[in-house]
């Protein structure tokens, strides 16, 4: 673990390596060295805990991941892969998922939040959707809310529901 000051900054930064052998850099938000040392140890301890539990070191907002998924779906459309289905996924993502979940950190989306979303979506649609629509407009189906099996702590970028 290394504490350092960036040029032109009075705030201490910490750089550390985990078992992934990559450097991780984080601000301590401390201007005093003693406070920075204490905070740096806490940051490192939390990072080790997340690593041991298979949790991501950094989380992203839902809308960032959603837009990455949309780009991947658009590339598939350009290649002629599942054009209509992918357009439906993009439409559901833009009309329902991003407006509701967009500002949430992905790690903070709970089952209760998904239940509340389902009520919100039904009100927005003005009806209870049929099962094929549910698959498109559900975050469990239309966007990656499950960890990849081959990369623990990372999220799948593929929709979970695919018809056709």
Image (cartoon, rainbow, N blue to C red):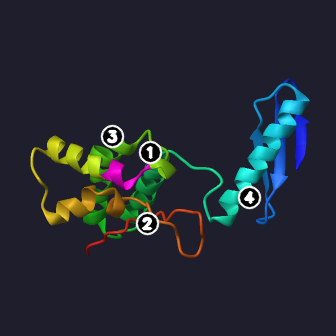
Badge 3 local density, few (<14 within 10 Å), some, or many (20+)? few
> Are the two marked residues, 1 and 3, in contact with CB atoms closer than 8 angstroms?
no
Mark 3 vs mark 2, foreground winner is 3
Spatial CA span between label 1 and label 4: 27 Å
Q: Is residue 111 magenta?
A: yes
Which label sits on residue 48? 4
Where residue 32 appears, as percent x and y from the top left, is 87, 26
Badge 3 is on which residue? 99
Badge 2 local density, few (<14 within 10 Å), some, or many (20+)? some
In terms of sequence position, does the residue under pointer 3 or pointer 2 come before the other? 3
Quarter of image, res 49: bottom right
Mark 4 vs mark 3, foreground winner is 4
Where residue 53 appears, as percent x and y from the top left, is 63, 64
- Location of residue 84 with respect to 163 vertically, above or below: above
> Are the two marked residues, 3 and 2, in contact with CB atoms closer than 8 angstroms?
no
SS class, disc 2: loop
Badge 2 is on which residue? 158
Magenta extent: 109-114
SS class, disc 1: helix
Rendered-image quadrant of the C terminus:
bottom left
SS class, disc 3: helix
Q: Nearer the viewer, residue 99 or 42?
A: 42
């Amino acid at each position: 673990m290394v504490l350092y000051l960036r040029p032109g900054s009075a705030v201490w930064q910490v750089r550390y390596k985990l078992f992934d052998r990559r450097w991780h850099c984080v601000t301590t938000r401390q201007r005093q060295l003693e406070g920075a040392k204490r905070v740096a140890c806490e940051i490192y301890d939390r990072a080790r805990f997340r690593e041991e539990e298979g949790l991501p070191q950094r989380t992203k907002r839902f809308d960032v991941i959603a837009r990455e998924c949309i780009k991947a779906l658009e590339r598939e459309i350009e290649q002629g892969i599942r054009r209509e289905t992918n357009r439906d996924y993009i439409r559901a993502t833009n009309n329902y998922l991003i407006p509701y979940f967009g500002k949430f950190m992905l790690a903070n989306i709970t089952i209760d939040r998904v239940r509340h979303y389902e009520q919100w979506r039904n009100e927005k649609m003005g009806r209870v959707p049929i099962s094929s629509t549910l698959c498109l407009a559900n975050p469990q189906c239309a966007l990656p809310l499950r960890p990849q099996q081959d990369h623990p702590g990372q999220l799948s970028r593929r929709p979970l529901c695919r018809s056709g």
